[in-house]
Image (cartoon, coloured by chain):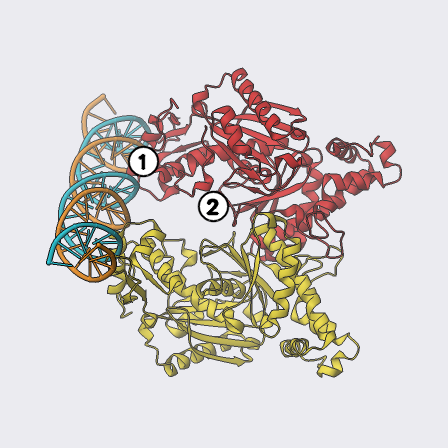
Chain colours: A yellow, B red, C orange, D cyan
Amino acid sequence: MATSPIWASRPKTRGRVLDLIRAARTITRIELAEATGLTGATISEVVRELMGDGLVVEAGRGAPTGGKPRTLVQLNPLARYSVGVQLERNTCVIVVVDLAGRQVARTSFHGVAQMPPQQALPLVAAQVDALLTTAAVDRDKVLGVGLVSYGPQDRRAGVLLTPQPTDAWLDYPVARRLAESLGLPVLLDNDAAAATIGEYWLGAVDPRSTYGCIYMASGIGGGVVVAGELYRGSSSNSVEIGHISIDVNGEQCPCGNVGCLENYAGPSALVRQALATPGLAQRLALNPTDADFLSEFARIGAAANAGDPAARGLLEQSARYLGFAAVTMASLFDVDAIVLAGPSFAVAGSIYQAVIQQEVDRRTFARRAHRVRVVPSVNGSDAAAIGGAVLVLQSELTLGHPRQEDARPVPAS
Amino acid sequence: MATSPIWASRPKTRGRVLDLIRAARTITRIELAEATGLTGATISEVVRELMGDGLVVEAGRGAPTGGKPRTLVQLNPLARYSVGVQLERNTCVIVVVDLAGRQVARTSFHGVAQMPPQQALPLVAAQVDALLTTAAVDRDKVLGVGLVSYGPQDRRAGVLLTPQPTDAWLDYPVARRLAESLGLPVLLDNDAAAATIGEYWLGAVDPRSTYGCIYMASGIGGGVVVAGELYRGSSSNSVEIGHISIDVNGEQCPCGNVGCLENYAGPSALVRQALATPGLAQRLALNPTDADFLSEFARIGAAANAGDPAARGLLEQSARYLGFAAVTMASLFDVDAIVLAGPSFAVAGSIYQAVIQQEVDRRTFARRAHRVRVVPSVNGSDAAAIGGAVLVLQSELTLGHPRQEDARPVPAS
DNA sequence: CATCCTTTATTAGGTTGGTTACGAAAGTCA
DNA sequence: TGACTTTCGTAACCAACCTAATAAAGGATG
């Protein structure tokens, strides 16, 4: 890479300072000293180093305080870029984001997940290349690619642990192959986990808070952030909220559990329920054989927004089920807030938010200690893809990776 | 205190090394260097400092390796002590443990929780004093007291957040008052959280693993340990597994939620079910008006062990319900193991363990990544009290408390 | 059994990432 | 204008590690 070696020294402190600057958008050295507990002298030097790398620039004066005014510093968003690639059941979304996590380019296409990975990944790589070219992003400034997908996975190996979307993807080295095709580091992670950290990075919640995220696309996933980092657990397959049981007398799920949330509140369940509701299927022109049930789900959400009582009833019931999961999440993880992210919250997010907040207020065990707020996504439908890109930014910049090897991206070639 | 100032320098590293020595029982300097990633030189000096404080002693030679034999070091268990006080609904358990976490004295008594705290706490303090005296423990070597209780609490303030056991306990400064009475630092924490860290300290699981604990006494609680530390969440009221819903159509619980695990699988629920089972109540001489339902529960467990089919059926059903909670815990926290601790597992623990393991094997979502083992407690009925004492040891010795103030015990007077 | 080799433990000195102390710069206030 | 306040950089120092050399305690070997 042509860019200077970023982590010449004290990676941890530099990462912390950079993260604070990012979270605050503009901040002064004095405030950085207060936030980190370091002295002004150290902050001065760290900021100088960050400015030397071009990651940070000065941005005018702060409010007058009676003495020398504080100089503001802020991120130089154009200094680095990162790519997020989301593989969903039917679609693939690719985004390019700048250092601040803001989207600078986006594309999406269908069909790729049905192909075997040998065919799909070069296609994805070509799309990434094209996107970087049309967005005129200097490739030397691209830190890497965050590849996100659903289901259990082995993050270190960069491999999926279930035969989804098709059998051919099981155990295929997706991260390594994409890295080879692109000549960029690739980091594999769970879509919900990515969305969770993406919401943090772009300011959905107070950066100091412990919060959870419920991510709903085709399925339902989740994530939790503690002290600015994802809760990982033993193998990074944590917060699998779509397959917790909300009904011990419920139906068997292919995952092995019974009464899984996803089969009550997920988009496919809602479409199923809508098809079984007299009149609703005809009114919304739902297609009982459509494999891409997300578009059917979107129509139900739109009808609910427009005032269709049956559609609204179904959605509110789904929200109540999600409310139970949110309460479980709050009771187990003791979070300050729960973010609702992902495409399936995009259509009728306000209905979901209101109902889930109500359930959480009524049912959360630790509500005596503090309220749990339910907040909407800031990243909308592309939360997972943006989150994938953010994971790379965080891994390369703010975590100052003297962590385990598992957090490192697969290096290119 | 007459003991030397323990944390003269590098508290973090000293804490880490001390924790490794504790976990290994005996270990060599070379192994410590490998485990910490530090060099032999640094380990040498840290170990010398620990020996200077009397916390660690050399203990013979290791196996010959062809060169100079490694010298073994181990904890000096008699160097420090710690007290654990558990306030349950009906009983109070007090234990004194040594530096290795082994119990050196124990007492228990009834009735104290029914008194107002103004009356109860001096009584507890007197019992602690008596126990230390009879066990001939040098008071200068007592690091502090871990006070554990159930329900939501404000750890920093040392205050309970629910009117339990009686209204008088709500918001009463229990930690501060006990500290004043005893002249020792007091740390307040949740019983289940304490039990969880106690199992870790005494070796129930691999110290490197991420694991959860289900603690069952009168109620059901839980804890999770990541990288040797309790998962705390936002306000330390985490892993409240007794009040997660396992049935969205279940009955209302006073906590606000419906279908709470505790009302299906907890001891009081089991006694209720037993009373409703024809013949069983008479056979076991259960008393429908007994407020101390734990003794009734123990009789059901004993009958199940002895082969009574009705009792065994009830217990297995309870275990299956707990299995659902264990699966939820595993799916959300992605743990390697789940420990079953507390008095209510003491009677028929093997039945519980077998059934819960079976459920976890069948139903855990991430089982493709790794199996989740269900393991019995090493601390038995007194897990919470021992855990309370261990919390003090950990806070004072191995965490090297440059953490937030909330982790510090309330200092004496 | 004296010598050599291997491995462990300690000592000496260097590097890193912080600290405190102080002074220069850049404003406000009287 | 001059006194005062506050910010920011420099210099000197310190804690916690590191590397390299050395001492100590065995086993293997001629």
Vertical position of residue A206 compared to residue B89: above or below: below
What residue sits right under mark 2 in the picture?
B227
Q: Is residue B23 visible?
A: no
Residue D23 is situated, as x and y percent measured from the top left of the image, at: 21, 29
- Snapshot quadrant of residue A375: bottom right
| Label 1 element class | loop
Residue type beneath disc 2? Ala
| Label 2 element class | loop
Circle 1 packing at 10 Å, graded few (<14), some (14-19), many (20+), is: few
Image quarter where the C terminus of chain A lies is bottom left
- Snapshot quadrant of residue B387: top right
- Snapshot quadrant of residue A359: bottom right
Please name whichever residue, A391 or B392, is drawn nearer the observer in this view of the structure.
B392
Vertical position of residue B173 compared to residue B104: above or below: below
Vertical position of residue B231 compared to residue A5: above or below: above
Q: In the picture provided, is A353 more to the left or to the right than B136?
A: right
Q: Nearer the viewer, mark 1 or mark 2?
A: 1
Residue type beneath disc 1? Ser
Q: Earlier in the sequence, mark 1 or mark 2?
A: 1
Whether label 1 touches label 2, CB < 8 Å:
no
Please name whichever residue, A214 or A170, is drawn nearer the observer in this view of the structure.
A214
**Mark 1 to mark 2 CA distance (whole Å):** 23 Å
Residue A400 is situated, as x and y percent measured from the top left of the image, at: 35, 57
Subunit bearing disc 2? B
What residue sits right under mark 1 in the picture?
B9
Subunit bearing disc 1? B
Please name whichever residue, B247 or A287, is drawn nearer the observer in this view of the structure.
B247
Q: Which residue is pictured at 63% across the width and 34% down the height?
A: B168
Image quarter where the N terminus of chain A lies is bottom left
Please name whichever residue, A141 or A307, is drawn nearer the observer in this view of the structure.
A307
